[in-house]
Image (cartoon, rainbow, N blue to C red):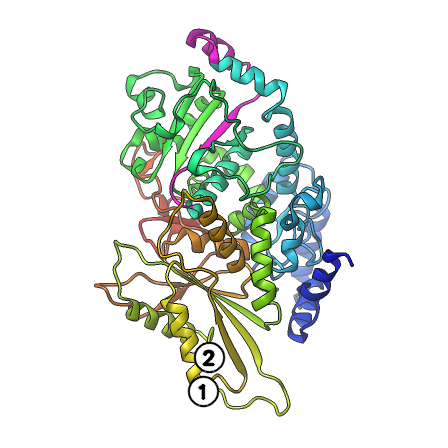
Amino acid sequence: MDKSKVIKSHLSPCRGLEARRRWCRAAARPAVLVITVSVVAALLMAVVLFGVRLTPSGGNSSSWVSAGVRDVLKAVSNNQDTAGPLATVPDPRDRLLGGLLSPDFDETSCHSRYRALLYRRPSMHAISSYLVSALRRYESLHRRCGPGTPAYVRAVERLREPPNASATSSSSAECSYLVWNPIEGLGNRMLTITSGFLYALLTDRVLLLHSGGGDALDDLFCEPFPGSTWILPADEDFPIRDMGKLNGGHHESLRAVLRRGDDPGVAPWLYIHLRHDYSKVHQDQQFFCEDMQAQLQRVPWLVFQSDNYFVPGLFLNPGHERELARMFPRRDAVFHHLGRYLFHPSNTVWGMVTRYHDEYFAKADERVGIQVRKFGWAPISTDELYGQILNCSQREGILPVPNAATGGSEGQPAKQKAVLVVSLHGEYSEKLRDLYRKNGSTGRETVSVYQPTHLGAQRSGEQHHNQKALAEMVLLSFSDAVVTSAVSTFGYVGQGLAGLRPWVLMSPVDRKAPDAPCRRAATMEPCFHAPPRYDCRAKANGDAGRILRHVRHCEDFPQGVQLVE
């Protein structure tokens, strides 16, 4: 029997459980609004003039595309193609996620690409038709300019030319490139790859990942772009040397070029330093300025390194505003869409994911993810943090209080709740498991607690460690509710792929859990921990969280900013 049919039979999100069937029927049918005649007339006028169809776009069917669509309508009114709806919620059964994914792949080469939707709760976040078109255009660009193509060979040859010759020919380069340089753990890397990809979309560059040695991406992700690769070839003669050693003070960095007073637009290549310490140097921060972007458009090769989700910084640039509004009518779904587009676990990792899921979570009525991370700069004891987790999850109704629920309807089986704990340490899952085992969870809910690994320490340079970490991120993204640790990029990835606003365990105060143990996040978007302090318009220091309505300071890390709707 075809294994994919077996998976669909048992794991389809709209089959099997009555509550889930009701949820999916509600998600699949249009919401009914009772509105006044004047509002109906206004909507009809919008349909006639713009071809607009309002569609649900939030975490529930009562959340509608509104503020974002207003921005899109302004763009559409300027002689733009208005065929079809501007943004639609994907059908839960659509393996292409509403056009987000390309159909041009062999399914056997990457099992997760078209099967992940069978495990995740259906996304209720609208996808812009303009974003779909932009992704197809990018895929065409990558096929034409990616590694192994004549255009790529010519671009590399230009890098080998003497500096003056390269400067002369750079303006006529047929393809431009953005090279990602790895740093930090897997969560940071996925967030920075996403940020780089969005920048590549906005600037017509080809994104290539520099990978080698302990930083290899082999057997971790499938290729996201059909007919090409996103891996920079390991060429010993590649003209840009020792990329792993680049820093803000390098002779070819944007910082150094600006300090010398040179024109950055004539360089054959430049290094862009976007690590957390860049926010102390205004030359580095000028990367986010509109006038600087106009100059960088003339540079054929940009190499960047970052440990930040710098997507909100791209929204601060007025030159990107129109394109971003059309791609993302909901600003709070950028990583949700781009993450689901880019990151498909390899068949090796997907096998780890599905084996664990099928053994422990497939029969559950509800899946709860709890991601726990401790940081040296925010010390807290194991017992104190465990109490915070329990206080949060029980107060918010995520986990039941043992024995507090007394008997549901007679003859009705208890609800099966499977809890996935993701942590480097095993104490938290052990304590939760013991709690529900010793005290019972009779009545309306039974709780089972699982933890795939407890590796003790982060080892980002080890391939097998990264495979396990990715498998856990993906399992976390299958959750129906998520509790995450403040400031954790691992949690950001899990919540974003799931499309959920998490309950965030707030950072300790004087080694103690705060009075409010957790807070429901205002957005599922990751936090940009080190936003630029340089206000490009004022040409002076400023507050990035006060420039735009939809870029606000993060709840879990007030120095940072994040996208909100």
Residue 400 has which mark? 2
Number of residues whose C-alpha sits closer than 10 Å to that of mark 1, classed few (under 14), some (14–19) or many (20 or more)? few
Residue 565 visible in the picture = no
Give the amino acid type for the residue marked by disc 1 in the picture: Ala
- Find the residue positioned furthest to the bottom: 410
In 3D space, how far apart are the residues under numbered discs 1 and 2 (Cα atoms)? 7 Å
Which one is in front, 101 or 358? 358
| Side of 336 where 109 appears, left or right | right
Q: Report the magenta residues as a range.
A: 160-185
Q: For the point 34% across and 62% down, which residue is it?
A: 506
| In magenta stretch: residue 350 | no
Q: Is residue 124 visible?
A: yes
Three-letter code, disc 2: Pro
Quadrant in the picture for the N terminus:
bottom right
- Report the side of 374 relative to 414 (left or right): left
Which numbered tag is attached to residue 170? none
Task: Count how many numbered circles sit on residues in the image.
Answer: 2
Asked if disc 1 and disc 2 are in contact, CB closer than 8 Å, the reply is: yes
Q: Nearer the viewer, residue 518 or 348?
A: 348
Q: Which quadrant would residue 230 be assigned to in this image?
A: top right
Q: Residue 384, located in which quarter of the rendered image? A: bottom left
Residue at image location 73% in from the left, 62% down from the top: 6
Judged left or right of residue 370, residue 96 is: right
Q: Indicate the secondary structure of the residue bearing disc 2.
A: loop
Task: Left or right? Give the position of 298 relative to 506.
Answer: right
Image coordinates of residue 503 in percent, x first then y, are 43, 64
Question: What is the secondary structure assignment of the residue under circle 1?
Answer: loop
Q: Which residue is mark 1?
A: 404
Q: Nearer the viewer, residue 517 or 388?
A: 388
Q: In which image quadrant can residue 11 be found?
A: bottom right
Q: Is residue 176 magenta?
A: yes
Residue furthest left as drawn: 510
